[in-house]
Amino acid sequence: MEIRPLGLDGVLEIVPRKFGDHRGFFSETFSVRSFEQAVTEAFVQDNHSLSVAPGTVRGLHFQLPPRAQAKLVRVVRGAIFDVAVDIRQGSPSFGRWVGLTVSSRDWNQIFVPKGFAHGFMTLEPDTEVIYKVTDYYSPEHDRSIRFDDPDIGIDWPLPVSDLQISDKDRSAPRLRDVDNGFVFVGEAA
């Protein structure tokens, strides 16, 4: 398993090994033993989404402390452009984002730590995303930030004029208008 930092404190690309032959393939996509050097979080829930149309945006989402969630995201069919935004007050990278294409073809994953908003845009039809989270869904702690917040400036790979998005995500506030409870502690890696 390869683990690569993506330039923001704690955000990682993870590429599990994949063994194939004439029958298909086998891959260990998660193992506490394999992850323990880079990810010490304990996952409690798996989520699975299907997005029919390319250009579907989900996010930017996060949960407030004490119900904050870290996420481990992978794609089992199709491809997404996955984004993590640092929302920790006082962080040297506050408001900065990193994006990664995650796909069933590349067999990669992205780890998004607590203190980051998360979202993605589908790049192919019928894209299925599975992600692990470190806390259960809590509606009273659930928050969103606008996917097109100009202060963040995410460079989405498909035109945002023709995207599929929920009313909740379309009407989300900008980062500067969100009191999120995350505070940066320590030095960025």
Image (cartoon, helix red, strand yellow):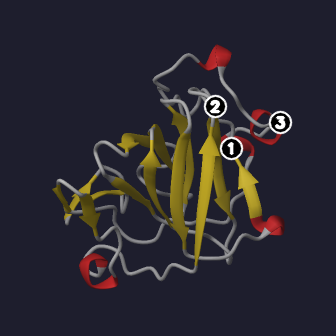
Image quarter where the N terminus lies is bottom left
Q: Tag 1, which secondary structure?
A: loop
Q: Nearer the viewer, residue 13 or 181?
A: 13
Disc assigned to residue 149: 2
Image quarter where the C terminus lies is bottom left
Crowding at label 1, few (<14), some or many (≥20) Cα neighbours within 10 Å?
A: many
Residue 40 in percent (x, y) is at: 38, 81
Q: Which residue is mark 3?
A: 167
Residue 187 in percent (x, y) is at: 34, 66
What amino acid type should be assigned to the residue bearing mark 2?
A: Asp
Residue 147 in percent (x, y) is at: 63, 35
Q: Contact, CB < 8 Å: mark 2 with mark 1?
A: yes
Looking at marks 1 and 3 on the same chain, the residue that comes earlier in the sequence is marked by 1
What amino acid type should be assigned to the residue bearing mark 1?
A: Ile
Q: Which residue is mark 1?
A: 145
The CA distance from mark 1 to mark 3 is 13 Å
Looking at marks 3 and 2 on the same chain, the residue that comes earlier in the sequence is marked by 2
Q: Tag 3, which secondary structure?
A: helix
Q: Tag 2, which secondary structure?
A: loop
Quadrant of res 3: bottom left
Q: Is residue 62 above or below residue 97?
A: below
Q: Is residue 120 above or below residue 134?
A: above
Q: Nearer the viewer, residue 143 or 165?
A: 165
Q: Contact, CB < 8 Å: mark 1 with mark 3?
A: no
